[in-house]
Image (spheres, rainbow, N blue to C red):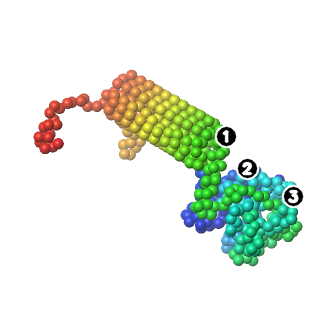
Amino acid sequence: MNTTAIILAAGEGTRMKSKVHKVLHTLCGRAMVDYPIRTVRALGVERPVVVVGHAAECVRAHLSDTVDFAVQDKSTGWGTGHAVMSAQPFIPADGLVFILAGDMPLLRVTDLERMRDAVETGAAGAMLTAVAGDPTGYGRVLRDETGAVSAIVEHRDCTAEQLGVKEINASVYCFRVSALLSALPRIGNDNNQHEYYLTDVVSILRADGLRIEPIVVPMEDCMGINDRVQLSQATKVMQRRINERLMRAGVTIIDPDHTYIEDAVTIGQDTVVHPGCTLQGDTVIGSDCTLLPHCRMSNAVVGDATTVEASVLIDCRVGSHTTVGPNAYLRPKACVGNHCRIGDFVEIKNSNIGDGTKVSHLTYVGDADLGKNINLGCGVVFSNYDGKRKYRATVGDGAFIGCNVNLVSPVAVQAGAYIAAGSTITEDVPGGALAIARERQRNLEGWVEARKAEGKL
């Protein structure tokens, strides 16, 4: 059956107390509006309709041309029913249509599939409901003797008996298009808020003798986000789901409550993730890796059987069977090969590190191309910046760079060359040569006593 989806995102979201539009606040690496869009696409809806109003240009800029936009003009009406009326030009003549909110990121595809099945098997519509421990503020769902919905009563309009009902309206709907289009013109705004409520569609169709099927889901599935507290609660639920999905796919997460993995991250089987790790963006971790405590990775790609400890990796690549850290910093465009060693307090930026090369500790490599099986000693610095421009250096295969060496770019160290500790290299070093660039040591006998006698020490 032809399927359309309308996602409501026109609200002001004042309770977020933010310059950012409510549906653009992120959880687990995605704007909250991206989640319902992804959910309906999983049902075959290629171009959902997003209803915008307040700060519409921000939502348009985020979603670009991936969806259709309808604009709710609030000078002509308010409320969820009016928002759906605004999207009416995008609703086809037949099929079924989902209506859901842009601030409900936790909806599951299976929830919507159950709604679709109910409509395809005869109901005029289906709606999600949940049983709330504390239903205060929610519309109550009343059922008839067959189990179908007979009415939705807003909390402020409930009788004492109705206030005892725990089943609440989740404000997610699926209708046969013909039924929805017949009911929309009959929605009124004769209520305290003078708004056009979408819930009226349910009572209108019920009065027409049509069946609305309630689909009960866990309360967390239909959690809406209206403030920062609810954003935090929804983020925790989403994080739990992500971690559980990864663990069921063969990843060991030592302490899921203290491991933060965003939605787009992928991790291979038999990788072990220790507490305190934060994996963000489009990070890809291979199989058989070990991420020791307190790593942060953003858009990083890590090969198989690599170990990373307490390090930061951003927009970089690391090969297989390599070790990184502790306390290493791989900045954008760092590319480290296989069987490498990147040690403690090493910083690498916009550089290529060949297979088997060791950069063990306290070293900065910036704008450089290093070959295979190179050893960089402690305290090596690639001096790549003259105050205006950046320059590149190259180091050939098998070179040995001693401790506390400064390589002043642009400079080339050819394959197999050695550089003595403490040297400052400003010229190319031929292959197989030993470069020494430091002042010869002199010992001045009696210097200390003489300085003391002069009162200078």
Which residue matches tag 3? Answer: 122
Q: Determine whether 196 is above or below 225 in the image.
A: below
Q: Nearer the viewer, residue 67 or 97?
A: 97
Q: Determine whether 363 is above or below 239 in the image.
A: above
Which residue matches tag 2? Answer: 42
Is there any visible trace of residue 255 in the rendered image?
Answer: yes
For the point 62% across and 50% down, the residue is 239
Label 3 neighbourhood size at 10 Å, few (<14), some (14-19), many (20+)? few
Query: Marks 2 and 3: in contact by CB < 8 Å?
Result: no
For the point 36% across and 32% down, the residue is 403
- Residue 134: x and y in percent read 68, 65
Kindly identify the amino acid type of the residue bearing the numbered disc 2: Ala
SS under mark 1 = loop
Q: Determine whether 386 is above or below 155 in the image.
A: above
- Residue 34: x and y in percent read 65, 54
For the point 39% across and 22% down, the residue is 432
Label drawn at residue 249: 1
For the point 64% across and 42% down, the residue is 247
Calculate the distance from the C-alpha at mark 3 to the C-alpha at mark 2. 23 Å
Query: Marks 1 and 2: in contact by CB < 8 Å?
Result: no
Q: Nearer the viewer, residue 381 or 428?
A: 381
Kindly identify the amino acid type of the residue bearing the numbered disc 1: Ala
Kindly identify the amino acid type of the residue bearing the numbered disc 3: Gly
Calculate the distance from the C-alpha at mark 3 to the C-alpha at mark 1. 38 Å
